[in-house]
Each structure stands twice: as C-alpha cells, then as structure tokens.
Image (tube, grey):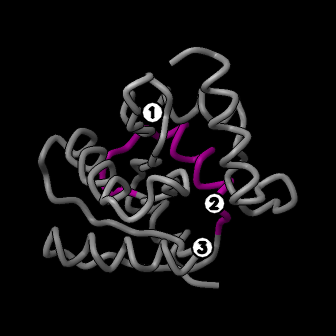
Amino acid sequence: MNQEAFEKVLRMSEEFFGTATDPNQMPVNQESADKLQSIHPDTVVYKFNEKGDPIAWVVVVPTSLGVMDKFVHKKISERELLDLAAKEKRFESLYLCGAFVLPEHRRKGYALELTKMAINKISGGRKLPLYSWIYSPEGRGLIDQLAKNLKQTITVVED
C-alpha cells in the first residue's frame, strides 16, 4: 500500500474511533502501526478494491494471557495493552482490537472475513482465547457473528 493510502487509512480510523482525545485507546498513528507490525506482520489485515485502495481493515493483537487478564479486568488501558504486547510478543490470546469498513462497502461480510483471516494467520490455526472491547453496535454484531462462526466464546469488555 502506498504512503498516501496508508495515511488515509490512519485519518479515517482516527475520525471514527476518536483516539486522539481518549488516552485509554490505542492511538491511530505511525508509531502504533510500527509496534503492531513488530509483533506480527498480520496484526493489520486489509481488503482492497479493484483500484488497489483499502476499503476495509481489521486489527488483531496477540498478547499473553496475563495482558488479557489485566485488560479484561480493567487494570490496564488499550494503549497499555499495545505497549505490553509489543514488549512481550507472546501469542497466548488474541485481542480483537478494531474493524473498519468504508460506509459504501458495509454489510458485505468484509469485517468478519478479515478478522477470521487475521486470527488464523496469527494463531497458526491454533484455538486461542479471544477478547474484545466493544466500541459500537456494529462491533457488538461482529463479535457475536464471529463467536457463532468460530464456535468459540469471546470475552467482551464493555464500558
């Protein structure tokens, strides 16, 4: 993906999730992208249109069970989760961090498809504990669909 498209992805993600004004959320910036890539090359998975522009993407972060436990029990923020995951590089659980699909491409199954792809690539096909922080009604729907599709419980953190 070219730099201009990548910057557009960052801009749209920031506008939707509002991480710049929320110190608890993982920042949407180049530094976070670099940290994610340092953990595993498939922490961010994209879907492109026929022109090669990104139309959907998901972020899945492998973490230790300890980080999962701290996050689920609200002892650490999402921002701290990323920092710990980047330091530890442990693949004991997967944090289903976020999904974004451009409005004109929604309701086509892209978020589910990409999330399953990222889970499989990062886990190497192993069944790992999954967890997520629900940010929107659409996120809740994705997590419910994913749990049903994978026949697996997903631990959910809600505000």
| Residue 7 in the image, given as x and y percentages of width and height | 69, 28
Q: Residue 78's image quarter? A: bottom right
Image check: 17 left or right of 129? right
Characterize the local packing of mark 2: few (<14), some (14-19) or many (20 or more) Cα atoms within 10 angstroms.
Answer: some
The answer for how far apart the CA atoms under marks 1 and 2 are is 15 Å
- Residue for badge 2: 78
- Residue for badge 3: 135
Is residue 82 shown in magenta? yes
Query: What is the residue that sits farthest to the bottom in this orientation?
Result: 159
| Residue 89 in the image, given as x and y percentages of width and height | 43, 38
| Residue 140 in the image, given as x and y percentages of width and height | 45, 79
Q: Which residue type carries mark 2? A: Glu
N-terminal label among 1 and 2: 1
Image check: 152 left or right of 71? left
Residue nearer the viewer, 23 or 50: 50
- Residue for badge 1: 39
Is residue 112 shown in magenta? no
